Amino acid sequence: MIKRTLMLAVSLGLSACSSPVTHYYTLQDTAPSAPAQSVNAPFQFEMLAVRMPVQVDQPQLVVRQDRGNLAILENDRWSAPLADEFHDALTDRLERQLGTRDLAGLPKDTQRPVLSVQTDVRRFDSLPGQYALVDVVWSLGLRTAGQPRQTLTCASQIREASGPDLSSLVVAHQRVIDTLAKQIAATARNWARGTGGCPS
């Protein structure tokens, strides 16, 4: 009887000391990373750093509870810093949309134009059961040998419906990044040809 009581006490003690399971999430999707287009892009591409609001640029997921309250979910975390997650996910989508690899920090062909993309995320809102929203200002720069550097600055606000669970919320943010990449890529191709500006 004493032995059984001791074992039960040890078991309860171990249960009390065990920590909750931590879940990790990513903004990367499951599609292959190879460029989707078979033709070469009319420019080389480099993805610059992403700026992210400090309120949400945390290891943990930060979700809105109402208009004024945020909740930091200690046991639900990004697999990398959120700015890096967003950067890498957007880079992957742009590589597929543009049909060329990101050459940031790598040697480039001096005879071909270089398109740079920089994003400044103003809002990264997460409301489980409602929506995922990103409000971002993004800039394109085009460098061509012997010509002045050209720039174009645009803004996008994209919202996707979300289910009540966190996995659904993260997938909604993945769809937001899909849409953003399509907008940036389409604008970049048209702008580089001199046939368009920011999306309406």
Image: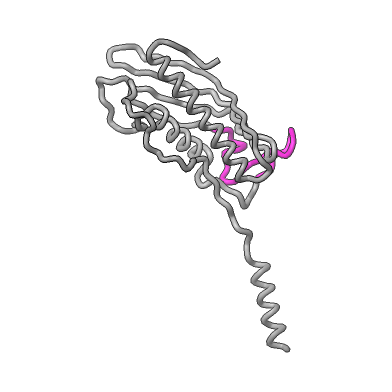
Residue 5 point in image, percent of width and height = 72, 83
Q: How is the image coloured?
A: one colour
Q: Which residues are magenta?
A: 52-72
Asked if the magenta segment contains residue 67, the reply would be: yes
- Name above or below for residue 182 compared with residue 11: above
Left-right relation of 115 to 165: left
Q: Is residue 181 visible?
A: yes
Q: Which quadrant of the figure has residue 107?
A: top left
Q: Residue at horizontal 40%, vertical 10%?
A: 194
Asked if the magenta segment contains residue 65, the reply would be: yes
Residue 137 point in image, percent of width and height = 54, 23
Residue 183 point in image, percent of width and height = 50, 23
Q: Quadrant of the N terminus?
A: bottom right
Along the viewing direction, whichever of 78 and 164 lies nearer the viewer: 164
Along the viewing direction, whichever of 8 and 100 lies nearer the viewer: 100
Q: Residue at horizontal 32%, vertical 26%?
A: 39
Q: Which quadrant of the figure has residue 156?
A: top right
Residue 89 point in image, percent of width and height = 47, 37
Q: Is residue 125 visible?
A: no
- Name above or below for residue 131 compared with residue 185: below
Q: Which quadrant of the figure has residue 142?
A: top left
**How many discs appear?**
0
